[in-house]
Amino acid sequence: MKNFKIIRLMALSAGLVSCAVTFSGCGAEKINLNDYLEVNYEGYDTIGVASVHFDFEKMIKDNPKAFGIDATPTDKKIMKIENDFDGVIDGTLSEDTELSNGDSISYKWDVSMTDKLSEKYKVEFVYEDADFKVDSLEKAEEFDPFENINVTFSGIAPNGSVSITGSIDAVPSLYFESDKTSGLKNGDVVKVTLDCYGDDVESYCIQYGKIPTVLEKEFTVEGLSAYVSAIDEIPEDMQEKMKNQAMDGFTANAATWVEGNSMESAEFIGYYFLTPKESFYASSNNELYCVYKITANVKGYTEENTEEEQTGQEVYYTYYRYSDIMVLEDGTCSVDLSNGYMTNNRLNSKFGSKGWGISYYYFYGYSDLDSMFNECVTKKISDCNYESTVQ
């Protein structure tokens, strides 16, 4: 670095080493350049900056005879002499940035006296390369950037989100970034990192005399209401409520059947449970199908006997569907039972009423489990994961 124009006023400790070098003319006056050299430091420990100042003005005023001037030269005269020596007296520091107290740096002179100057000024320059020890850089003050920061989670898992609020008063323009901002569920770990614009955070902070004690922290997502992701997350009491509501739905439906027909039994045989695959869209966050085997008592005419009413039993399969089942923050389960519904798939009975031929009755259900599984699950497995307890 070549810079004699910047003056920095901070503490200096120096030791002069190496062999002396001189530039002189016959009868010239000796001037020790090291007497007019200063190395100054500014900044903070670990990022200190060194700068060099060579005091031309003092050198000229201390040696008026050598430069052919009187004891009180004008500023104009001093400036003219300085211009003559511009580029003649120079040098380089071995290091000038990222300095710490105790570091050793050196200054190497680069002096190139011309014959023309030797004739004009009767001076003999004496100088030695110099070693300096960096000291007096201030220590940066530690601070906890997370001290006044709140990280909170909201929404319903697995679609929760994170919010970071608060301020960092110690250093301006710092901010926090989270590696995850959405799609969160309880138990996820979110990493929050201190950052700034276009710079290394620690180097930026130390410019203000501060150093962060921590750059990142991890936070575990908790306290979110959550859409259940497995059947066993639904408490037994809620399962019973859903099955009871399903039975009420089947009973109400059977009450609309033609007189003489009735529901003999409704046997619960298991669940189908579906959740959207990650990053896939689905109309609901989960679906639970309560699957039943229905036995119906039926009375009517059949294709085999169109003259006399027959009685018999028919078996079919049906479901009652619920969606968006949640576990709330307090651990209780929540589901809108009023939004549950029975399939609208129609299955024709073998029995019917007589008119212009036979008008067959129908049930809301399926003739076999494979048909129902195909409708409820197979058609959705490209977008959904599923679980089945139906045997």
Image (cartoon, rainbow, N blue to C red):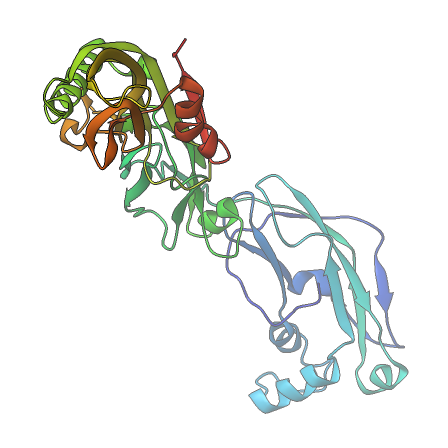
Q: Is residue 142 above or below residue 305?
A: below
Q: Quadrant of the N terminus?
A: bottom right
Tell me which residue sits at (78%, 56%) in the image: 128
Tell me which residue sits at (47%, 36%) in the image: 383
Residue 213 visible, this orientation? no
Residue 169 on image: x %, y %: 30, 48
Residue nearest the viewer, comparing 245 with 365: 365
Residue nearest the viewer, comparing 342 with 52: 342
Residue 226, located in which quarter of the rendered image?
Answer: top left
| Residue sitting farthest toward the front | 307
Residue 137 on image: x %, y %: 51, 46
Q: Is residue 261 left or right of residue 106?
A: left
Residue 386, located in which quarter of the rendered image?
Answer: top left
Q: Quadrant of the C terminus?
A: top left
Q: Is residue 368 left or right of residue 309?
A: right
Residue 390 on image: x %, y %: 38, 12
Residue 113, located in which quarter of the rendered image?
Answer: bottom right
Q: Is residue 267 above or below residue 386?
A: above
Tell me which residue sits at (85%, 52%) in the image: 19
